[in-house]
Image (spheres, helix red, strand yellow):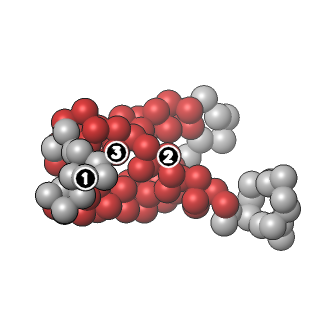
């Protein structure tokens, strides 16, 4: 199950890399800078969920497939949270404008 979390997180990272490679101003160091914190946070949170899986079995059953889904969805959620506070991204609300 630990490998499922890591596998899901790496799949999401590769999907993000595939989108970033298509941009004309792609920079490897910027890509790593923007993605290492969500990747690490996602893996740590997934490991905590697996560690406490006996206590949460009534709410969520952790299986091999669900651990991969945790890795994928966790990465997406953390990237969206970081995007909320990014001043370079325009939002409909305009809360993060310079």
> Which label sits in the foreground, 1 or 3?
1
Eyeballing the image, is 87 above or below 15?
below
Percent position of residue 51, x then y:
16, 61
Q: Nearer the viewer, residue 18 or 26?
A: 18
The one of 83 and 1 positioned closer to us in this rendering: 1
Q: Residues within 10 Å of mark 2 (few under 14, many from 20)?
A: some
Q: Which mark is residue 97?
A: none
- Judge the density around disc 1: few (<14), some (14-19), many (≥20) Cα neighbours within 10 Å: few
The Cα atoms of the two marked residues, 2 and 1, are separated by 25 Å
Left or right of residue 18: residue 87:
right
Residue at (19% x, 39% y) in the render: 63
Q: Position of residue 90 (x, y in %)?
A: 80, 54
Name the residue that disc number 2 marks: 76
Residue 32 visible from this viewpoint: no
Q: Which residue is mark 1?
A: 58
Outermost residue toward the bottom in this view:
98
Compare marks 2 and 1 and give the one earlier in the sequence: 1
* Rendered-image quadrant of the N terminus: top left
Query: Which residue is found at the position 50% from the left and 30% from the top?
Result: 18
Q: Secondary structure at mark 2?
A: helix
**Residue 1 in the image: above or below residue 81:** above
């Amino acid at each position: 199950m630990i490998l499922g979390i890591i596998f899901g997180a790496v799949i999401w990272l590769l999907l993000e890399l595939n989108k970033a490679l298509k941009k004309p101003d792609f920079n490897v160091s910027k890509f790593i800078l923007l993605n290492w914190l969500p990747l690490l946070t996602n893996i740590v949170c997934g490991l905590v969920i697996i560690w406490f899986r006996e206590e949460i079995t009534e709410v969520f059953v952790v299986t091999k497939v669900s651990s991969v889904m945790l890795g994928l969805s966790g990465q997406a959620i953390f990237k969206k949270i970081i995007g909320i506070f990014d001043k370079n991204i325009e939002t409909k609300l305009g809360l993060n404008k310079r």
